[in-house]
Amino acid sequence: MEYIKPEPNTKNYQQMLDKIIESWQNDPEKSVRRPRLLMHSCCAPCSSAVLDYLCRYFDITLFYYNPNISTEKEFDHRVSELKRLIHEMGIDVERTDEAGVKLGAVSVVVPAYDHKEFLSIAKGHEKDPERGERCHLCYRQRLEKTADYMDEMRSKASESNEDPVQAYDYFCTTLTISPMKSAEILNVIGAEVGERHDENFLPSDFKKKGGYQKSIELSGKYDLYRQNFCGCEFSKAAGERERAERKVFNQEHA
Ligand code: SF4
């Protein structure tokens, strides 16, 4: 995969998302149904607060495409936590909350795990720091695959003469909730991918409005597995190095 440098484009992504939600609620033509969202999900903790926020406005399919995760065991553990989370949040089936707002039903799509897909794009970027070019390629790979799936579902809907509204209206990623990830870079890449696929990328900065804090709170409430590295072996090794260095520093300064 060719590295394309994302050009800085600072915008208020949270405000853009609010406006899109409002447009669905206030436009009489749109408000006859809920928009359908294909949401790339990296893990249960990041998805928790995003689901808590968005499942009252969208019908959501989680797309767990993460070939970046270093081992199949870790990949499987994260997806099983994700499925447990939506079940325990009670949003794997359709229901209404105390205020009568419809929630769910959230489904999960899990493409087959193949770590080689990630290693091929990370080649030559093994030593990049977290948030560097390797990460930009990794975001793009995951968003490209999400948009590919969205295209595939749109073609299936039109081939089978299903109502075209069965296709997704938007795609996005839970990754913007992480303080380790730049919402600006993710939104620039997402918009580029969306434009090429002629699909709508939903802008977001899920850290805003206390989103990251909420994810910590929900991770505690549901006792979610919170991994101490982003996903790839390079982030795992960097994290281990940092922890070892901190230990030595603390010992020396005790
Ligand atoms: S650190 Fe995270 S985002 Fe960056 S390449 Fe590794 S898995 Fe992908």
Image: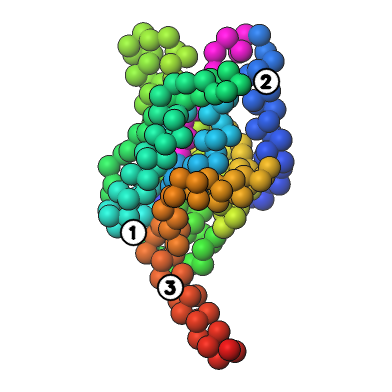
Residue ID at (51%, 67%): 129
**Camera sees residue 230:** yes
| Image quadrant assignment for residue 125 | bottom left
Comes first in the chain, label 2 or label 3? 2
As for residue 34 lying within the magenta part, the answer is: yes
In the rendered structure, which amino acid carries the disc numbered 2? Answer: Ser
In the rendered structure, which amino acid carries the disc numbered 3? Answer: Glu
Comes first in the chain, label 2 or label 1? 2
Q: CA distance from mark 1 to mark 3?
A: 14 Å
Rendered location of residue 217, percent (x, y):
56, 48
Rendered location of residue 70, percent (x, y):
33, 59
Secondary structure beneath dot 3 equals helix
- What label sits on residue 23 in the rendered view? 2
In the rendered structure, which amino acid carries the disc numbered 1? Answer: Ser
**Camera sees residue 183:** no
Q: Is residue 217 above or below residue 242?
A: above
Q: Is residue 58 above or below residue 236?
A: above
Q: CA distance from mark 2 to mark 3?
A: 46 Å
- Residue occupied by mark 1: 70
Q: Please provide the residue range marked out in magenta.
A: 29-40
